[in-house]
Each structure stands twice: as C-alpha cells, then as structure tokens.
Image (tube, rainbow, N blue to C red):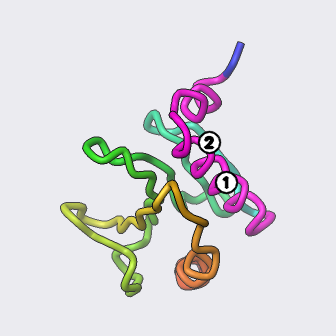
Amino acid sequence: MISELEAYYISKEEPVRSTLLALRSYILEYNVDMTETWTHRMPMFRYKGKLFCYLWTDKKTYEPYMGIYKGIDIEHPLLDLGKRNKMKVIYFDAGKDIPVDTINEIFEMALKLYG
C-alpha cells in the first residue's frame, strides 16, 4: 500500500510529476537536516523539525511551485506573495530545467532565519 505522500506525486501527470520529484530530491539532498512529512494534506519539508517549505501545483494553471514558510521575510525577485499572508512561492516551468542557483539563493536566505 502506498502512502498519501507517495500517492500525491504519483497522481500528477508528466512533466509536472518529474519536476516535483526532482524538487523533492533536491530539497532532501540540500541539507542533512531536511525531512519530508505529509502535513495539511501536502508534502512539507522541515529543517531541524521546523516547517521550511512545501511543494504544490497551482489549481488553475497546474504549474508546480514551492512555498517558502518564512518567505515574507525574504526579498527575492522570483518569490511571489500573491494573496498569501506569510509565505511566498516560486513557480517552475515543468518543461524546463529547475533553476538550482535560484533555489540555492532562496534557501540560503531562508536558512538564516532559522538561527
């Protein structure tokens, strides 16, 4: 039997599934203190047990995106607050390479907020 977490990724169509799985692998390999949980019915990633980011897809465009928990405190041109109060998101084009350098920049700024 597969978990809800695994079912989330499996339920996505290509190329969104591959993009989300690549992001998942990247996040988990980014730092040994990153862990993945199934929280609020979505894949969440924690840094040293504290909420750090999550992966999701836009309901209208189906674009994959990553939400950054402390994003409100991060200034980066690709992070979008939208209608959210605290979290900012970065959207990804499922047909293109993942912008690893951009993710690194955002993660470096975010990790500083976790003391």
Residue 107 in picture, x, y percent from top left = 58, 76
Kindly identify which residue carries mark 2.
Answer: 37
Quote the CA–CA distance across marks 2 and 1: 17 Å
> In this rendering, would 37 be left or right of 34?
left
Q: What's the residue type where badge 2 is placed?
A: Thr
What residue occupies the far left of the structure in this picture? 83
Determine the residue positioned at 37% across, 85% down.
Answer: 77
Magenta stretch in the rendered image: 3-32
User: Considering depth in this image, is 113 or 77 the residue closer to the camera?
Assistant: 77
| Main secondary structure of the magenta stretch | helix
Q: In which quarter of the image is the N terminus?
A: top right
User: Residue under circle 1?
Assistant: 22
- Nearer to me, 76 or 110: 76
36, 106: nearer the viewer = 106
Give the residue drawn at x 44%, y 47%. Answer: 56
- Identified by mark 1, the residue type is Ala
Question: What is the secondary structure assignment of the residue under circle 1?
Answer: helix
92 relative position to 114: left or right: left
The answer to if 17 sits in the magenta stretch is yes
Q: Position of residue 69 (x, y in %)?
A: 44, 64
Q: How crowded is mark 1: few (under 14 residues within 10 Å), some or many (20 or more)?
A: few
Give the vertical position of 14 relative to 66 (above or below).
above
Question: At which x and y percent is residue 37?
Answer: 62, 42
Residue at the image position 24 percent from the left and 61 percent from the top = 84
In this rendering, position of residue 66 left or right of residue 36: left
Which part of the image, by quadrant, shows the C terminus? bottom right
